[in-house]
Image: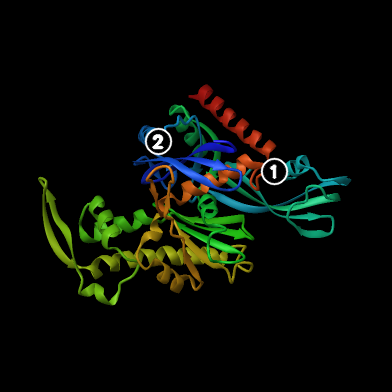
Amino acid sequence: MIGRNVVTVLDIGSSKVCCCIASVSGDGRFSILGTGCCVCLGVKSGIIVDMASVERSVAAAVERAEKSANYLAKSVYVNISGASIKSRIVNASIYLGGKIIKNDDIVRLLSSFDEHMQEMDLIHSIPIMYSVDSLNGVKDPVGMIAQQISASICIVGAPKQQLRNIVLCLSRCHLEPVGIVASGYASGLCVIGESQNNGNQIVVDIGDSTASASFFFNDTFCGMETIPLGGRSITKDIALGLNISFASAERLKTLHGAAFVSIDDDRDMIFIPAVEENNVIDLQQIPKSALNHIIQYRVEEILKILKKKIDESIFHNDFSKSGVTLTGGGSNLTGIKDFAMGILNRKVNLKKINCESSEQNILIDNGFSVALGMIKFAQLSEISIMVDKPKKKMKNSANFFRKTLNWIENNL
């Protein structure tokens, strides 16, 4: 494939591991060559709590994707998620003395601040806006003459131990991590440029164990807020409220669940497994409203907490009139767009992913939003000076992975 590269991305979630192998080109297009998914029980809110279980899930998902794509994956882009992922805005500047700005100067600018974030490691350094001398709002300063160049930079950090465990897990599966991407950033990349909103945007991703609100200023990521609630919380409520197994609750949510109770729900009847013993299931009939009352209560809580996070963020003024785009597996609930519009008091657009490979019959839905976003991240990494990390910055990232692996080998 001339002018095309193959990238592998790995989305390690709290309920499943998804691997996508894609062929990407320099014009921004990509084609899914193969996918693999496997149930994952060793991750809680983005943190590995059972290494052996996660290793098996990663190995199985990657193997299925490799067979589907007929491709051997050696290096991967992997996500990192959870409420422990933090972002903040820093300002940095360097003195050039009237010289022409080069790519190396941008690298130096993005590295000129203190990267130490207590017990955190830097995973993203994203320039939001440049200033060249007295000229503000510069999008690309390379090639301009300047006495001084400044930038507002969004930095994203993750706990050192959380990162080390992810790298260790991949190394045990004989995979080399070439990039780590915050899940909120990745799901936003999946949406930006394709939604119906204009200007500044907020992307709300409702995942399995976490939900996030990511802010994009003129299509550039500038921060995010994350809460430890998601689709799994809804399923647990259903299982507890109806006294059924988690698996049955998940199926009920998928088949009959809605974000709020409608007028017809009291008349519509559904069956639930009342007794599950000795492989004998007794079905009990209940109104659909009994199910959707449970779902509505939890969805309302998730959206209200996210609204509070958005309203209290440093971006509140700049994003006061911005629309919201919903994505993630939790956005598949019937009626969630209209319900979210009432809770968030904003225009809401629902990102419906319905992507199919041209080479194979592979259907991809909203549960793949993080994986698709990581493919776009990989494209940015491959092209040139990516918005996130310039080429030399990527070398520093590779050094981080090597140092982490060396630390693991010497201390374990």
Residue 198, given in percent of the width and then of the height, sits at 59, 66
- Tell me where residue 169 sits by quadrant: top left
Image height check: is 302 above or below 68? Answer: below
Depth check: give the residue in front, 166 or 105. 105
- Residue 250 vertical position relative to residue 112 in the rendered view, above or below: below
Q: Nearer the viewer, residue 40 or 75?
A: 75
Give the structural element (helix, strand or loop) at label 2.
helix
The count of marks equals: 2
Could you say where residue 159 lies in the image, as x and y percent from the top left? Answer: 53, 42
* Residue that carries the numbered disc 1 in the rendered image: 114
Q: Residue at x 27, y 59 (%)?
A: 255
Q: Residue at the top extreme? A: 410
Residue at mark 2: 58
As shown in the figure, which amino acid type bears the numbered disc 2? Val
Kindly report the distance in space between the C-alpha atoms of the residues bearing marks 1 and 2.
Answer: 34 Å
Q: Residue furthest right?
A: 98
As drawn, is 89 to the left or to the right of 269? right
**Residue sitting at x 86%, y 49%:** 145
**Disc 1 marks which amino acid?**
Asp
